[in-house]
Amino acid sequence: MATKRSSAVPESVCASPSLKISKEVNPQHASETLLFVSLMGGGVPVPENCNTHAFYDRFFRSFIKVDHIQRGKISCTILAKAPICNGYGTLHGGAVGSLVEVLSTACARTVVAEDKGLFLGEISISYLSATPINEEVLANASVVKTGRNLTVVALEFKLKKTGNLVYITHATFYNMPVASL
């Protein structure tokens, strides 16, 4: 059963004005949770210059430098700068997911005709280790399978300095047929 916010829970920039806290939750724990979310940047408004069409795509692509392209393969260097790192000083897991989407789509496009649409059906990411802030990561994507209806891309991310594997991923795309109108 949820109740209105207890007076023991202080106001928080990340809390909704209609915040309800269950009776089973200790007010001290609720307060600590709100503090944690606030410290991680919760409730901070999006700057106006970031509130534009396609900002997100351009933002993530700015951390990628393409090193090599060939049919079915693409190699890139990614710099783990502060804007895509978490509060622990490592590359944010969500940023890794966004980078996987960009790189796997680029790799799939090396074998799938431009006139066919790509629908991203699945991404799988194994987080093996953390990438410290300001480290360079080598990303190697390759097409594992491609056919008339399906393309699968595998990616490996390794720390440039040590060669240690940090993430293993795969993405499955459905090749959309060209509409005949």
Image (tube, helix red, strand yellow):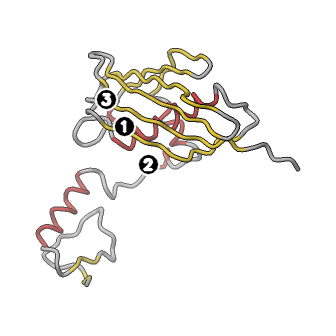
Residue 73 % position (x, y)? 55, 21
- N-terminal of the pair, mark 1 or mark 3, is 1
Instruction: Say what amino acid the circle numbered 3 marks.
Output: Val
Foreground pick, 16 / 67: 67
Residue 87 % position (x, y)? 24, 43
Q: Is residue 141 left or right of residue 148?
A: left
For residue 47, the mark is: 2
Question: Residue reaching furthest right?
Answer: 181
For residue 166, the mark is: 3
- N-terminal of the pair, mark 1 or mark 2, is 2
- N-terminal of the pair, mark 2 or mark 3, is 2
Instruction: Say what amino acid the circle numbered 2 marks.
Output: Pro
State the separation of the CA atoms marked 2 and 3. Answer: 32 Å
Nearest to viewer (mark 1 / mark 3): 3
As displayed, is residue 87 above or below residue 108? below
Q: Disc 1 marks which residue?
A: 84
In percent of the image, x 31 and y 37: which residue is there? Answer: 127
Residue 31 % position (x, y)? 16, 66
Q: Is residue 67 left or right of residue 128?
A: right
Instruction: Label 2: state its secondary structure.
Output: loop
Within 10 Å of the Cα at label 1, are there few (<14), some (14-19), or many (20+) other Cα atoms? some
In percent of the image, x 22 and y 40: which residue is there? Answer: 88
Within 10 Å of the Cα at label 2, are there few (<14), some (14-19), or many (20+) other Cα atoms? few
As displayed, is residue 56 above or below residue 156? below
Foreground pick, 141 / 33: 141
Foreground pick, 176 / 98: 176
Instruction: Label 1: state its secondary structure.
Output: helix
State the separation of the CA atoms marked 1 and 3. Answer: 16 Å
Instruction: Say what amino acid the circle numbered 1 marks.
Output: Ile
